[in-house]
Amino acid sequence: MTTTVAVTGATGGLGEAVARAFADEGATVVVGGRDRDALDALAAELGGESLRTDVRDEYELERLLERASKAGDGSGVDVLVPCAAVYHGDAGETPLPGESYSAFDDTMRTNARGVFAAVREALPHMDETGRVVIPTGSVGRDADAGFGAYAVSKAAVEGIMRQFAADCEQAVGCVDPGAVDTALHGMGGRGPGDVAGLFTWAASAPDRLDGAVLDLADWRAATA
């Protein structure tokens, strides 16, 4: 049976790298994001499917997950990785007291509500073996000056993860890849491809994943 994986935010950076990593392991990958041309090119390369998806719109997520459930062998969604995220401003230079209401609202709607909606729309297409692997960062647990609404959104994501894990039979957890060099924050870090294996590894170990935050140290210890 082919594993079907749905990835949001797959038009570049971490989401694209994660989609590639699952495809390399033989999964059918269905990708969503805002750049239709980039999505279509990635899906064609990976032999998967794509659908333009704005995670701020639950109806677009509903359509993405419905498509994913019919992809591959048509048996539903096995893994969801909601990678879509935004950062308004220069990373580390957006203290919360100075955040605009519009930036705060869009950050929360994309990074937190977008994760909630993606998981909510995926669950009807998952059996009890389904897995949800949500990216997070230490800034959501250990406050760091200047990260404003982004840090708040990551704290919310971890709360969303824990509650889904408590309420669902599927395995739901977070992975923290550390600083990743993407256009999201421009602060450098590891290459997206260097940490994508953390996601495929987490998805392969649902008992370890469920309700937890796994990081690079966990991955390295398990695969050493």
Image (cartoon, rainbow, N blue to C red):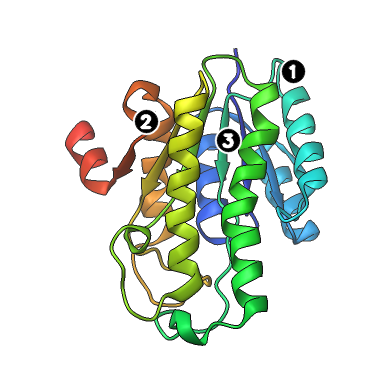
Q: Are marks 2 and 1 in contact (CB under 8 Å)?
A: no
Q: Residue at x 67, y 77 (%)?
A: 102
Check the image and report above or below for 137 versus 118. below
At label 2, the amino acid type is: Leu
Tell how many labels. 3
Residue on which the image places disc 3 = 80
Q: Do the residues labelled 3 and 2 touch (CB within 8 Å)?
A: no
Query: Which structural element holds mark 2?
Result: helix
Residue on which the image places disc 2 = 209
Residue 35 left/right relative to 171: right
Residue 142: percent from left, percent from top:
28, 63
Q: Do the residues labelled 1 and 3 touch (CB within 8 Å)?
A: no
At label 1, the amino acid type is: Gly
Mark number, residue 74: 1
Residue 126: percent from left, percent from top:
63, 21
Q: Which residue is drawn at 71% across and 48% down?
A: 32
Which of disc 1 and disc 2 is earlier in sequence?
A: 1
Which of disc 2 and disc 3 is earlier in sequence?
A: 3
Residue 70: percent from left, percent from top:
78, 23
Residue 12: percent from left, percent from top:
59, 60
Check the image and report above or below for 83 versus 96. above
Check the image and report above or below for 14 versus 73. below
Q: Quarter of the image containing the N terminus?
A: top right
- Distance (Cα) linking label 1 and label 3: 15 Å
Query: Which structural element holds mark 1?
Result: loop
Q: In which quarter of the image is residue 35?
A: bottom right
Q: Residue at x 82, y 44 (%)?
A: 59
Residue 5 left/right relative to 129: right
